[in-house]
C-alpha cells in the first residue's frame, strides 16, 4: 500500500522523495515522473514509487475538489485510514503526527499544482482523443454472384475513439490508400511543427511538460 510505504521510509529516504517533488517539473506524466524519481530515492523500487506517485496525484485532485485546508484534509484522511482497520497503518500518537506531517509536505508543493493546471488545460476541449485503429479488408467485385470475382478493391476503415463530457464515443471513416498517404503526411507535418515549437520553448527556457 502506497500510504504504508510513505510511513516506512527512513528520514533520509523521505527527504530525498520530498526533494524530488520540489524539483522544477520536466514532465507531468506520472509514470515518467516515477521513473525519474526512482533514480533518486533509495528504499523504493520502481513499481512501489509508481504507486506512491499515482496516489499523491489522486490525493491532490481529491483535495482540490474538496477545496479543504491542507491540515483539515490530512486530518480527515487519517480518520479514514483509522476506520479502514488496516494493520499496517496503525499509529502511535508520535508516528501519527510524523506521518501527517509527511503527507502535508508531499501534498503542499508546486509540482502537483502545475500538474493539475496543465492536465486541466490539456483536456479543455469539446472532445479529447482516446485511441484509434485502422481496419483493412478486401472487397471483391462480382459480375454475377455465382461466378469468380472479376477483381477486388482494398479498403480501410479508420476508427477514432474519443471522450466527450465524460462519455466514451467513437466514429468510423472509410479510407483508401491515397487517404492513408494524406493522413501520414498530415501526421508527419504535425510532428515537425511540434519539434519546431519545442525548439522555441527550449530557447525561452520553458520545459515541454509532455515531451516524454
Image (cartoon, grey):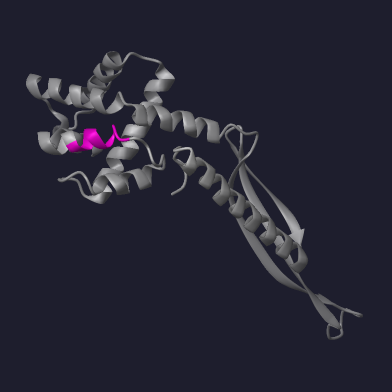
Residue 150: tell me if it is visible: yes
**For the point 61% across and 44% down, which residue is it?**
162
Residue extending furthest toward the front: 203
Residue extending furthest toward the right: 143
Q: In this rendering, is residue 99 above or below 52?
A: above
Q: Magenta stretch: residue 20 in it?
A: yes
Residue 4: tell me if it is visible: no
Res 76 quadrant in image: top left
**For the point 34% across and 28% down, which residue is it?**
59
Q: In this rendering, is residue 186 above or below 110?
A: below
| Residue 184 drawn at (x, y percent) | 67, 61
**For the point 10% across and 25% down, which residue is it?**
95
Q: Magenta stretch: residue 94 in it?
A: no
| Residue 122 drawn at (x, y percent) | 54, 36
Q: Which residues are magenta?
A: 16-23
| Residue 177 drawn at (x, y percent) | 75, 68
Res 113 quadrant in image: top left
Q: How many marks?
A: 0
Res 63 quadrant in image: top left
Q: In this rendering, is residue 137 above or below 201?
A: below
Side of 164 relative to 70 (left or right): right
Side of 164 relative to 10 (left or right): right
**For the point 16% across and 46% down, which residue is it?**
42
Q: Which residue is at the front of the view, 163 or 176?
A: 176
| Residue 196 drawn at (x, y percent) | 57, 49
Per the picture, the main secondary structure of the magenta-coloured stretch is helix
Quadrant the N terminus occupies: top left
Q: In this rendering, is residue 131 above or below 118?
A: below
Q: Which residue is at the front of the view, 188 or 94?
A: 188
Amino acid at each position: 500500500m502506497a500510504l504504508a510505504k510513505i510511513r516506512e521510509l527512513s528520514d533520509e529516504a523521505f527527504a530525498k522523495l520530498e526533494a524530488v517533488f520540489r524539483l522544477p517539473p520536466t514532465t507531468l506524466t506520472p509514470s515518467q515522473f516515477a521513473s525519474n524519481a526512482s533514480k533518486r530515492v533509495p528504499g523504493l523500487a520502481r513499481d512501489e514509487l509508481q504507486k506512491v506517485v499515482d496516489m499523491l496525484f489522486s490525493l491532490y485532485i481529491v483535495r482540490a475538489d474538496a477545496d479543504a485546508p491542507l491540515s483539515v484534509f490530512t486530518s480527515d484522511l487519517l480518520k479514514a485510514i483509522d476506520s479502514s482497520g488496516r494493520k499496517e497503518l496503525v499509529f502511535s500518537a508520535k508516528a501519527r503526527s510524523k506521518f501527517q506531517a509527511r503527507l502535508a509536505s508531499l501534498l503542499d508543493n508546486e509540482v502537483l499544482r502545475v500538474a493539475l493546471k496543465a492536465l486541466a488545460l490539456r483536456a479543455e476541449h469539446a472532445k479529447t482523443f482516446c485511441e484509434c485503429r485502422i481496419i483493412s479488408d478486401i472487397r471483391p467485385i462480382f459480375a454475377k454472384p455465382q461466378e469468380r470475382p472479376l477483381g477486388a478493391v482494398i479498403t480501410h476503415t479508420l476508427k477514432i475513439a474519443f471522450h466527450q463530457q465524460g462519455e466514451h464515443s467513437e466514429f468510423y471513416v472509410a479510407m483508401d490508400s491515397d487517404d492513408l498517404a494524406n493522413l501520414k503526411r498530415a501526421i508527419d507535418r504535425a510532428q515537425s511543427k511540434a519539434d519546431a515549437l519545442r525548439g522555441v520553448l527550449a530557447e525561452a527556457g520553458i520545459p515541454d511538460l509532455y515531451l516524454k
